[in-house]
Amino acid sequence: MSEILAELRGVSRSYQKGKEKVEVLHELDMDIPVGDFVAIMGPSGSGKTTLLNMLGGLDRPTSGTVKVGGAELSSMSNNQLSNWRSTHVGFVFQFYNLLPVLTAQKNVELPLLLTNFSAKERAERAAIALDIVGLADRARHRPAELSGGQEQRVAIARAIVSDPTLLLCDEPTGDLDRETADEILKLLQVLNSEHGKTIVMVTHDAQAAEYAKRTLHVDKGQLESRAAA
Amino acid sequence: MRFLNQIVAVTRLNILNLPQRIATSVVAIVGVTAVVLVFAAVLSMAKGFERTLTAAGSDDVAIVLRSGATSEMMSGFSHEQTQQIANLPGVRRDGDRPVSSAELFVIVDVPKIKTGKDANVPFRGVDASAFGVRDDVRIVDGRMFETGKNELIVGRGAQLEFAGLETGATVRFGRVDWEVVGAFTAGGSVSESEIWTDTPVLQDAYRRGASYQSVRVRLDSPESFAAFSDALASDPRFDVDVYTERDWYASQAEATAGFIRLLGYPVTFLMAIGAVFGALNSMYASVSSRGTEIATLRALGFGPVAVLVSTIIESTLLALVGGLVGGALAFVVFNGFRVSTLGSSFSQVVFDFAVTPDLLTQGIVVALIIGFVGGFLPALRAARLPVAQALREL
């Protein structure tokens, strides 16, 4: 049996919207083994992104527990969660979220500012990450000088530069054309199969989900599991 | 080290982003500039006034006035008393003669060059030894007046501020015409606001008989003041107050300088409140426009305290720029700006605004306080930003 990296037990998350209480996740259980590449699909408002945020320590459950790599996230303070995120998780966002005033190299170096690496070591590691995503020759370009696919590659390089065990991707191809999306998804597959990254990817796109090892469907805050095609 | 790295990195990003929020940033900077400009300008007036009055203040010169007199105008001595005072212990002697000056002080109306309106100008009768009881007094134009003649010399400050006092001019004060025969400087002190003539001539022109209003003596040393003061206090012939020149000018400066400060600090405070709102507005706009960026950094692992500190640093840096610009403007526009105002003897004192290093430092401190206060609440908002929610607001 594979080692479990992330474990959610009885996770519920509700919000107060005016006088109404909206429950986004309802007593959800989920296990993500080390080395998994799982796609999470579901209609809008089903709780996909909230689930991803729980795994990344960006949100806290109203009830239940979230454990990742043995760490109980729901009991951590904000500062502890920040520290934990900096070493254990890499995020890839739909709109890349690169900082427009920084070059690709400096964007990728950002997470390394949270480590004790020297400036030289940071530059070397960022260069390696950019090389992995095939953008070594774009290191000095700013985001505005890159295509959407290239921007997402830089974002992926930023996500892997501190060598986290878990990559959380929120609609990583949602803003890309089919061809570019396929390239990004293949890159994620490589990171999963060759670099051992555990990947959780939220997507609306069934074709994108086919790149994952398995797909989980979320609906009304609850989970339904089935094997990937 | 990691924490410092975070602060430096986020602060750098904030500053790199400034061009995208140039309008609100400029508003904040201009607000702080205005505060520091007004602060430095108003207080430089007090500073200049004080500096002028205390420039000549010496510890080895004593001024004697009638008891209870708070200005020379309210004092009075007979000729005999001035001689007795001059011969007390502690007074320096030049051969057989004490170094002292019995002086008479009247006020004359002279129009200001700038406005043409009459102002009260001190007209002082002095002994020949007046130069001996004042430091740095020098004739810089023309010559010294001759005793017994209707001649006068004019302080450089008065000459630049009031009309008709050029060397060679004739002016009418009281019942007689006076010839301006020279101009003098006095180390930038209050004496430069005055007109001087021979005491007996002035007494005659203003029908003052043989009366005097003050006696200045040069002491053997600053330590001799106690002996001189004790001699005056223990002698039943005198009912006087005695001051060192430094203390006298300091007390004369305090009322006017204090009044200027009384105006300056509240005005600065009120303007600072306005500038804080400007900074608040700028920083709230900054945090709002960078919500996604801040959320991204927080998602990457940057801590809330780093975001808070860097936002305050940004606000403080903007305020610092405003402070430096305001200070520089104040220095360029106001430092050395010459004006005159009514001193404690109901006469005009000519002085220069003095934008001094300590005033500029105070201005910068005011700017930094504005920056800190204006940045704190927006920084708190930035640090408390709900990351998951902000990441969705693209």
Image: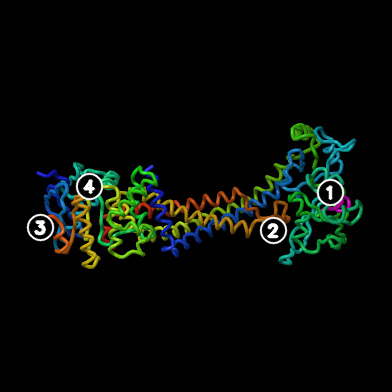
Tags 3 and 2 both on a single chain = no
- Name the front one of labels 3 and 2: 3
Instruction: Determine the CA span between mark 2 and mark 1.
Output: 26 Å
Instruction: Determine the CA span between mark 3 and mark 1.
Output: 110 Å
Query: Mark 3–mark 2 contact, CB under 8 Å?
Result: no
Please tell me how crowded label 3 is: few (under 14), some (14-19), or many (20+) other residues with Cα within 10 Å: some
Measured as percent of width and height from the top left, residue A89 is found at 25, 49
Instruction: Determine the CA span between mark 3 and mark 2.
Output: 87 Å
Q: Chain of mark 1?
A: B
Residues in magenta? B196-203
- Name the front one of labels 4 and 1: 4
Residue B284 in sight? no
The residue identified by callout 4 is A165
Tags 3 and 1 both on a single chain = no
Which residue is drawn at the image coordinates 10% and 57% (left, top)? A228
Figure disc tally = 4
Q: Chain of mark 3?
A: A
Q: Chain of mark 2?
A: B
Which residue is drawn at the image coordinates 17% and 58% (left, top)? A48
Q: Chain of mark 4?
A: A
Amino acid type, label 2: Arg
Where A101 falls versus B62 (above or below)? below
Amino acid type, label 3: Ala
Circle 3 SS class? loop
Circle 4 SS class? loop
Which residue is at the front of the view, B138 or A137? A137
Amino acid type, label 4: Thr
The residue identified by callout 2 is B338
The residue identified by callout 3 is A228
Please tell me how crowded label 4 is: few (under 14), some (14-19), or many (20+) other residues with Cα within 10 Å: many
The residue identified by callout 1 is B126
